[in-house]
Amino acid sequence: MRQFKFLTIIILTIFFCACGSSTKSKKSDFSISTNASQNKKSKVFSIAKDQTLELDIKNPKALNVTATSFTIDGSPVNRTVNLKDFKLGNHSIKAIVNHDNETQTVTYDLVILNDVPPKVYTFNIINEYPHDITSYTQGLEFHNGELFESTGQYGESKLRKVNYKTGEVLKNIDLSKNYFGEGLSILNNNVYQLTWKEGVGFIYDANSFEKTGSFKYGKSKEGWGLCNDGSRLFKSDGTEKIWQLNTTTLEEQSHIEVYTNKSRIVGINEMEWVNGKIYANRYQLDGVAIINPENGAIDGVIDFRALKKKVTQHEGLDVLNGIAYNPETKTLFVTGKRWDKLFEVEIVEK
C-alpha cells in the first residue's frame, strides 16, 4: 500500500511538471520599431525629451495584422508621441497587435533623457559661522529664522535647533543608539526626520521637540534626504529616485528619476527646496545638483569642492553635506560632515 502511494505521488508530480512546462508562452512574432537609439553596451533604448517618439511594429512573417495600439506605462498613445510633458527616466512601452483572430503583446523599456546638459555654477562666500565639528550633518533647514539640524552615526544621531550665527544649541534630543539619523524637513510646524536603514521616520513638534508620531517607508527602502515646497514633501533614498509623500499619511504617492542629458544620477542625498527647484547633495561628491521637481531633469550643478579646504582639516573630516535656504536673507547655507564652519554663499554661473 505504501509503495502504491509512493508511485502515485511520483506519477502526479511528473504530470504537473509536464503541465507546467507546456504553458510557456511562445516568443512574439512581432517587435517594436522606434526612432529611439540603443546603447551598444547596455542595450537600453533612450531618447531626449525634446524629440518626438515614433512607434511602429516589425512584422517579419507578414502576418495579417488587423489592428495595432500602443501604451506607455499603461496609458494609450498614438504612433507619434510628444515627450515634453513626460518625466525623465524609465518607461514601459507596449504594443498590442491583433492578427488572424489572435492578440499578441510586445514590450520594451525606454529611458527619456534631458535635452540639454546642466549649467555649471560656482559660489561666492558671504559669511562664515561656527559649526559643531562633531556633528555628522545629514539634514539642514531654516524655520522661523532658526537652523534645524539632523545628524547621523549610530550612538551619535540627534535632532537639534541652533542659533546659526553663534553655533549655540537652543534645543537638542538624542536618538536611540539603534537609529542612524538622516535628513529632515519642517512643514506645518512638524519636524520630519528620517533614519537610514531602519525603515522609519519620526515626527516632532517644531517648538517643543515632543515626538508626536512616526511613519514607515514603502518602496524606498532607505531614508536619505527630505525637503518640502510648502505643501509637498520630497524624500530621497540614495538612488536616482525622489519620492513625493502624502503629507497626511506620509505614504509614497509618486516619484521622479534624476537624469541629465546622458544618464541617470544616483546617490541623491540631503535636499533643500530653493525657488521652485530641489537642490540636492550627491553622496561622496562635494557638489550640489539643481533638479526640476516635475520631471527629474538636472538643470544645473554647483561646484563646492573648494569649500572643504577652508575648514579645519582633521582625521574625521568628511564630505560636503547640508544645504539650507534662509528665506529671510534669501541666501544659501552649506556645511559638511564634521565641518567646523557653516558657509553663507551666493551662487554664480561659471
Image (cartoon, rainbow, N blue to C red):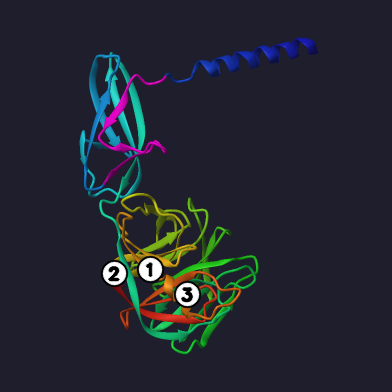
Q: How many residues crowd mark 3 within 10 Å: few (<14), some (14–19), many (20+)?
A: some
State yes or no: discs 1 and 2 in contact (Cβ < 8 Å): yes
**Is 33 a magenta residue?**
yes
State yes or no: discs 3 and 1 in contact (Cβ < 8 Å): no
From this viewpoint, is residue 213 visible? yes
Please indicate whether residue 263 sits to the left or right of residue 267 in the image.
Answer: left
Q: In the depicted view, which residue is nearer to us: 164 or 259? A: 259
Residue that numbered label 2 is attached to: 350
Q: In the depicted view, which residue is nearer to us: 296 or 313? A: 313
In three-dimensional space, the C-alpha distance between marks 3 and 2, rounded to whole angstroms, equals 19 Å
In three-dimensional space, the C-alpha distance between marks 1 and 2, rounded to whole angstroms, equals 10 Å
- Say which label, 3 or 1, has the lower sequence index: 1
From this viewpoint, is residue 192 visible? no
Please indicate whether residue 23 sits to the left or right of residue 103 in the image.
Answer: right
In three-dimensional space, the C-alpha distance between marks 3 and 1, rounded to whole angstroms, equals 11 Å
* The image quarter in which residue 332 lies: bottom left
User: Looking at the rendered structure, which numbered label has been put on residue 303?
Assistant: 1
* Picture quarter with the N terminus: top right
The amino acid type, in three-letter code, at marker 3 is Lys
Expressed as whole percent of the image width and height from the top left, the position of residue 11 reads 66, 11
**Which residues, given as a range, are shown in magenta?**
27-48
- Say which label, 3 or 2, has the lower sequence index: 3
The amino acid type, in three-letter code, at marker 2 is Lys
> In percent of the image, x 54 and y 19: which residue is there?
20
Expressed as whole percent of the image width and height from the top left, the position of residue 288 reads 39, 66
**Is 308 a magenta residue?**
no
Say which element carries label 1.
strand
Residue that numbered label 3 is attached to: 308
